[in-house]
Image: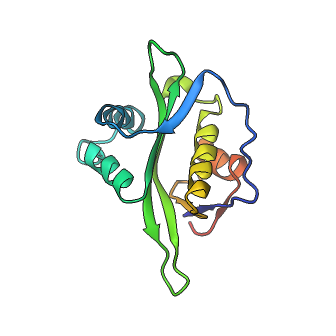
Amino acid sequence: MFTFNHRYASTNVSKSSSIMIKPCNTYEELDECVALQKLVWKQSSLDIMPRRSFLIANKTGGIVLGVYNNHENSRVLLGFVLSLPGILPGKSGGIYWHAEMSGIHPDVRNQHIGQQLFCKLRDYALSRNIKLIKYNFDPTEIRNAHIYINRTGSIGRQY
């Protein structure tokens, strides 16, 4: 479990005008996330998170963000992140987001799109007074470790 340290994260990444990051709310947008999930993760049908899971995230205080190319006539989903709401245990409690799943289309990897997506997730969290985002990822996967730790300033709490 890694936590996102907002003090060190920077939203000053090279932002391309050719992409747009926005919440995914419509059935069509969420279906695009499910399709991209299948492409990126190559999971069995039993492990695919269905559209209703994305809907539940949106309706219970979480968020689904999508990265799109910014072409008016041919908008294509390039990546997404699904964040579920969580409640911290104990007296101090508090609400956080758990970034359950993310994916970037294989054709557009290594273009800082994931970094921009997670920085935008941070912005949305802070605008909703959510001060903690937790992630699960395998730090031995070098691409994931680089994005989560080096690019977003996350702090490893347990492995």
Residue 37: x and y in percent read: 38, 38
The coloring applied to the image is rainbow
User: Is the C terminus in the top left, top right, bottom left or bottom right quadrant?
Assistant: bottom right
Q: Is residue 150 visible?
A: yes
Q: Give the residue drawn at x 65%, y 23%.
A: 17
Outermost top residue: 73
Q: How many numbered markers are drawn?
A: 0
Q: Is residue 142 visible?
A: no
Left or right of residue 86, residue 31 in this image: left
- On screen, 8 above or below 79? below
Left or right of residue 72, residue 9 in this image: right
User: Is the N terminus in the top left, top right, bottom left or bottom right quadrant?
Assistant: bottom right
Q: Give the residue drawn at x 60%, y 44%.
A: 120
Outermost left residue: 46
Front residue of this view, candidates 113 and 95: 95
Q: Write down the quadrant of residue 114 in the picture.
A: top right
Residue 7: x and y in percent read: 75, 60
Residue 39: x and y in percent read: 38, 31
Q: Give the residue drawn at x 31%, y 54%.
A: 56
- On screen, 23 above or below 91? above
Q: Write down the quadrant of residue 74 in the picture.
A: top left
Residue 25: x and y in percent read: 37, 40
- On screen, 127 above or below 79? below
